[in-house]
Image (cartoon, helix red, strand yellow):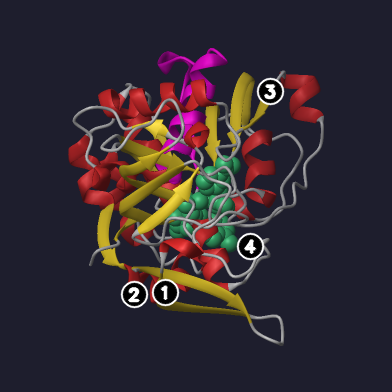
């Protein structure tokens, strides 16, 4: 038997979430690697699943948890054997395949990434999908040729998981980062992560003109909606915007003007179905290039039981940085 969060559907369609005991026979058949989870985490999507605020769960009952790190205990997959240390992010885990907010899981070996040597399960989950997505976004800016002397980089949703790690990565690489936040009281926190300047997100969140004063050489946006439209409208000639999120909304009320008059590039970033080579590269760079001291300052540890009560907070934008879940706690 092992402890897990289990989601089920009430008669009225709402989601019921509870801490319960499951046994191995309840783990999914369509997996070839059985693992002990040591740490998981709460991402924005886990908040949506646990509260039922958005239909991210597509099979019931469901163990949520899109991220997990721990040790393989049994495997029929050629790449994995008992004792191997892994990281799992996405692939529909915690949505259509039982997830990692549990002490045990059965997963597909093809989904797993080997945990870089020296990186603990706790550190991997402090980074989690949010941090790995921040690395995918930062890498996208580099791949598009955004250089540190091109100008400022805007990071929106700055005090959230993606935003906090993005600031730490970009400032570590020597970029000048401007953080946009709704929590100006967190200015010292954002500067300690490496932001050179902090702006009020209200400057970006209302509908704006299709072309605005050129400010950003690059943007990492986890907010979407009018914020993304304004960020694109303020991007300098030839600059790049990496879009990965929708904390403000899924809409994109923009015009083509920045694309056809300023050659602005808008790059979509997805972590869930990203190919394995991209994941391995991102985790390798996180292991070597992310300042682990900064990561520690953005991380709070909670238990599985606390994950239930903290889930609404992440949707309400009340969480600073990252919540790592000690599933044994
Ligand atoms: P968090 O909740 O940790 O961070 C989101 C931040 O966005 C908040 O902290 C807040 O920052 C800001 N925010 C919240 N509500 C609003 C609003 N109404 N208007 C403007 N800003 C707002 O979530 P994550 O960092 O984990 O994820 C961020 C987004 O990225 C989510 O939409 C998530 O679904 C998406 N995502 C996508 C991935 C992909 O593969 N494409 C992977 C990971 C995440 P502040 O108070 O500082 O303004």
Whole-percent x, y for residue 38 in the image: 28, 52
Q: Which residues are magenta?
A: 129-156
- Label 4: few (<14), some (14–19) or many (≥20) C-alpha neighbours in 10 Å: many
Cα separation, mark 3 vs mark 1, equals 41 Å
- Identify the residue at image location x=35%, y=31%: 169
Cα separation, mark 1 vs mark 4, equals 16 Å
Q: Classify mark 3 as within 8 Å of ligand 1 or not, answering yes or no.
A: no
Q: Earlier in the sequence, mark 4 or mark 2?
A: 4
Task: Choose between 164 and 235: the one closer to the eye.
Answer: 164
- Identify the residue at image location x=41%, y=31%: 113
Q: Quadrant of residue 290?
A: top left
Q: In the rendered image of this protein, does residue 9 appear above or below residue 222?
A: below
Whole-percent x, y for residue 55 in the image: 68, 64
State the residue position of label 4. 57
Please give left or right for residue 56 compared with residue 253 in the image. Answer: left
Q: Earlier in the sequence, mark 3 or mark 1?
A: 3
State the residue position of label 2. 305
Q: In the rendered image of this protein, does residue 146 appear above or below residue 126?
A: above
Residue 132 included in the magenta stretch of the image: yes
Q: Secondary structure at mark 3?
A: loop
Identify the disc placed on residue 308: 1
Task: Choose between 144 and 36: the one closer to the eye.
Answer: 36
Cα separation, mark 3 vs mark 2, equals 45 Å
State the residue position of label 3. 264
Which quarter of the rendering shows the N terminus?
A: bottom left
Task: Choose between 156 and 178: the one closer to the eye.
Answer: 156
Between tags 3 and 2, which lies in front?
2
Q: Are marks 1 and 2 in contact (CB under 8 Å)?
A: yes
- Identify the residue at image location x=46%, y=57%: 65
């Amino acid at each position: 038997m092992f402890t897990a969060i289990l989601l089920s559907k009430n008669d009225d369609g709402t989601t019921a979430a509870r801490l319960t005991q499951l046994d191995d026979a309840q783990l999914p058949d369509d997996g070839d690697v059985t693992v002990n989870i040591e740490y998981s985490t709460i991402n924005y999507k886990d908040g949506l699943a646990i509260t039922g605020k958005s239909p991210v769960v597509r099979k019931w009952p469901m163990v949520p948890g899109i991220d997990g790190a721990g040790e393989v205990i049994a495997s029929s997959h050629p790449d994995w054997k008992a004792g191997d240390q892994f990281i799992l992010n996405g692939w529909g885990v915690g949505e259509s395949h039982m997830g990692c907010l549990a002490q045990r899981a059965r997963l597909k070996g093809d989904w797993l990434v080997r945990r870089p040597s020296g990186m603990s399960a706790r550190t991997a989950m402090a980074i989690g999908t949010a941090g790995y997505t921040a690395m995918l976004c930062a890498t996208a800016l580099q791949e598009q040729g955004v250089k540190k002397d091109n100008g400022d980089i805007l990071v929106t949703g700055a005090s959230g998981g993606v935003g906090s790690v993005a600031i730490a990565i970009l400032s570590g690489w020597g970029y000048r980062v401007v953080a946009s936040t709704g929590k100006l009281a967190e200015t010292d926190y954002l500067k300690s992560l490496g932001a050179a300047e902090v702006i009020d997100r209200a400057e970006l969140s209302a509908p704006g003109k299709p072309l605005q004063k050129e400010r950003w050489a690059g943007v990492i946006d986890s907010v979407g909606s009018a914020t993304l439209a304004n960020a694109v409208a303020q991007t300098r000639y030839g600059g790049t915007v990496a879009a990965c999120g929708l904390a403000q909304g899924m809409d994109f009320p923009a015009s083509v003007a920045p694309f056809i008059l300023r050659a602005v590039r808008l790059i979509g970033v997805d972590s869930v179905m990203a190919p394995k080579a991209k994941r391995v590269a991102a985790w390798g760079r996180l292991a070597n290039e992310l300042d682990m001291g900064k990561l520690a300052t953005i991380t709070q540890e909670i238990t599985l039981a606390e994950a239930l009560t903290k889930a609404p907070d992440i949707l309400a934008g009340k969480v600073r940085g990252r919540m790592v879940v000690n599933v044994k706690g």
